[in-house]
Amino acid sequence: MGAERTDEGALSEGFLAQVGARVRSARTEQGLTVQQLADRAEISRRLLTQVEHGQANPSLVSITRVARALGTELTELLDPLRPSGAISVVEAGAEVLVWSDEGGSSAHLLVATSHGRAADLWRWRLEPGAGYQGLADPAGSQELFHVLEGELTLTADDDRVVVRAGSSARLLSDRAYRYANAGATACVFVRTVALSGAR
């Protein structure tokens, strides 16, 4: 599977605890053993056990693989994003810190659609030199970006594009892709993930 991982950094403890409990619950509801789910997700049994107990430091890609092996997506494993009515508000500070590194880079899941996970909205901050190598999404999936500060380098197939502050971009994410900050200052951007074939 190669280097499909968050380049550096760690998933937040709160995120890991919440996702771990939900993974364990979903696995048992589906009647799967730890080994069966690990095989489906193409990760080790040991890592899956640690994920379920909130003790591992897996990549964001590994957690995505586990979610997909359970027939769901990462955002569907998070309680705060579940809607409570026709309008749901995630108050400032209540977004989910999913990933961060020691250099100050971070990824916050702001809000997600319900019932089929058609799209989710993220806020990322990448410090100079930081990047993310993504796992290919289902065929037809796309990601939308709007750069608020700095510049973001997007790479997919043989294309490499620099998106500067104030500009937006669309990325076909059903293939290997990467985004990085090759600039000299922090890059802040919002990202919408729209998976094809959402349930």
Image (cartoon, helix red, strand yellow):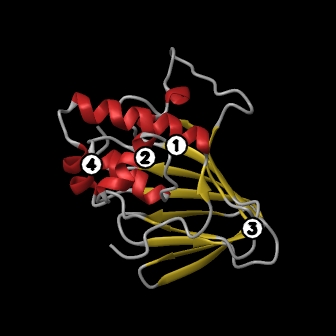
Residue that badge 4 annotates: 69
3D distance between C-alphas at marks 3 and 4: 32 Å
- Find residue 128 and report its horizontal and vertical position in percent: 75, 73
Tell me the SS state at disc 1: helix
| Residues at marks 4 and 2 touching, judged by CB atoms closer than 8 Å | no
Residue 155: tell me if it is visible.
yes
Mark 2, other Cα within 10 Å: few <14 / some 14–19 / many ≥20: many
**Of residues 144 and 29, the one drawn nearer to the viewer in this rendering:** 29
- Report which quarter residue 2 is drawn in: bottom left
Q: Which mark is residue 55?
A: none
Residue that badge 2 annotates: 51
Q: In this view, does 80 lie above or below 46?
A: above
Counting residues from the start of the chain, the first of labels 1 and 2 encountered is 1
Residue that badge 3 annotates: 127
Counting residues from the start of the chain, the first of labels 4 and 1 encountered is 1
**Of residues 161 and 99, the one drawn nearer to the viewer in this rendering:** 99
Is 26 on the left-hand or right-hand side of 181? left
Amino acid carrying mark 4 in the image: Ala
Q: Nearer the viewer, mark 4 or mark 1?
A: 1
**Of residues 67 and 35, the one drawn nearer to the viewer in this rendering:** 35
Counting residues from the start of the chain, the first of labels 3 and 4 encountered is 4
Counting residues from the start of the chain, the first of labels 3 and 2 encountered is 2
| Residues at marks 1 and 2 touching, judged by CB atoms closer than 8 Å | yes
Residue that badge 1 annotates: 16
Q: Nearer the viewer, mark 3 or mark 4?
A: 4
Residue lying at the far bottom in this picture: please name it.
Answer: 158
- Find residue 19 and report its horizontal and vertical position in percent: 46, 38
3D distance between C-alphas at marks 1 and 2: 7 Å
